[in-house]
Amino acid sequence: MKCTPWAGIPAAALILLAPAFSANAGEEHPMALPPPAGTGGGGWDGGCAFLDWLGTPVYDNPGGPLLQSVKFFGRAQFQYAYVDGEDINGAGFSADFEEIRRLRFGTEVKFLNYFKAKVNANLEDDNSPKGQDRDIQYSSLDEARVSFDIKKAFGAGALDGLTLNYGRHKVKMSQEVHTSSKKIKTVERSAPANKIYPVRMTGATLDASQGNWAAALGLFTTDDSRELASWNAGAALYGSATVEVAEGHEVILDFLWNDANGDAGDNRVADNNDYDLYEWALSAAWVASGPRWEVLVNGMVGDNGSQSKMAREGNFYGLVVMPSYEIVEDRLEGVLRYSYQGAEEDQGIRTNSRYFRRDHGGNVNSGRGDEHHSIYAGLNYFLCGHEAKFMAGVELESLDTPGAGDGDADGVTYWLAFRTYF
């Protein structure tokens, strides 16, 4: 379905009108500064300065009565993969894939002193890994939220921050999902993380913070949409808390419960492994970090609830362990990741779609099974920190498929990627 790229029109209108909102019409308008001198050349130093400049506000007037700031942001992510393996019947398969993984553009507007609107759109519909078309066009909204700063407007006692948000949200389940795709350390998030990571959901969240902790409570509709969903389906409750338990040590807890599970008409949201949304899931993560290293340990557990087949129901569980180290400070990072997911039923978990179960000619039971192991080893080369980087990795996967073929499938994927944002 072709859609009209309307998402940026309101922001563009605000930018054109921004001078009218300045506090005194006779004063110089606080529009964007010219590009920094470094953007004209100097290799990657110039490129990095240009990316920084792109991300600066085009209008910035904190004292303005109506409009305080306007800025644009975007990201572009490209990747290539070659997968080679043995399917559930013992036959070999191999294929390569190249993909525009993400292409997004958005705007953030601060207005009326207490409000912020943030909208960004997906501008690619790349189905080439499925043997279909690649279209550069408006595809869907990524996130679209309006936020009200309660703390700033009314005060919030001892709290450092209190904000109410409504709109289309990224629901952060697992530490890997708390980390933006701009800054994840592997080309793709782990399959256990994607298992509990829902597609974008519409609803309201209340964010609070104080000292060493931050928390969020959310209520979402389980209707699905490419933009803002209706409330004609069921509902899901969400809670998240992040606590810095010691210097360099952080604990993250996430929980999501879906009251519409079991009613296909009311549960239209999927996870990022293309399952119907589970009944509930819990994630507990510990992150330890130093000047040049980081270690993540993340456990997950949940209940698939009612699915289209009984073999896809029952409890599931997962584990991710991921250490990383800057081999060359601020330039080259090494990453290892082990992930495991298991289930009570024969098809209770699923591999990532990229690229173990893509169209490579092998039968891997659509990536469904009851146990899945993955080991990833990679290098990240930073041109401008995470703003521009190359990523390379190798991932070995093993999937147990009871009752299907020989009962298992294995594969190795070689990854290359380039990612940039402003």
Image (tube, rainbow, N blue to C red):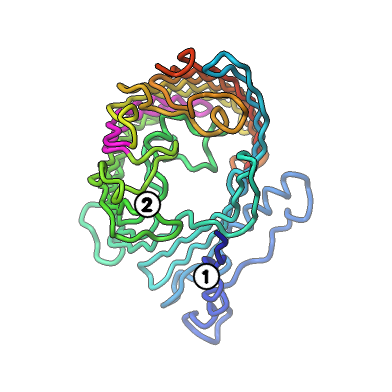
Question: From the viewer's perspective, is the residue at label 2 or at label 1 nearer?
Answer: 2
Counting from the top left corner in percent of width and height, residue 362 is at 59, 24
Q: Mark 2 points at which residue?
A: 201
Residue 67 painted magenta:
no
Residue 206 visible at all = no
Secondary structure at numbered mark 2? strand
Residue at 37%, 59% (x, y): give it: 229
Counting from the top left corner in percent of width and height, residue 44 is at 73, 44
Classed neighbour count for the residue bearing mark 2: other residues with Cα under 10 Å, few (<14), some (14–19), many (≥20): many
Left or right of 350, for residue 70 = right
Rendered position, 385 above or below 30: above
Secondary structure at numbered mark 1? helix
Residue at 27%, 35% (x, y): give it: 305
Q: Magenta: predominant secondary structure element?
A: strand
Give the camera-side residue of 328 and 281. 281
Rendered position, 209 above or below 354: below
Q: What residue type is labelled 1?
A: Ala
Counting from the top left corner in percent of width and height, residue 209 is at 29, 48
- Where on the picture, by quarter, is residue 306? top left
Distance from disc 2 to disc 1, alpha carbons, whole Å, reads 23 Å
Circles 2 and 1, Cβ within 8 Å, touching? The answer is no
**Residue at the outermost bottom position:** 26
**Magenta part of the chain:** 278-307
Give the camera-side residue of 265 and 135. 265
Going from N to C along the chain, the mark reached first, 2 or 1, is 1
Residue 287 painted magenta:
yes
- Where on the picture, by quarter, is residue 330? top right
Rendered position, 133 above or below 414: below
Q: What residue type is labelled 2?
A: Met
Q: Mark 1 points at which residue?
A: 11
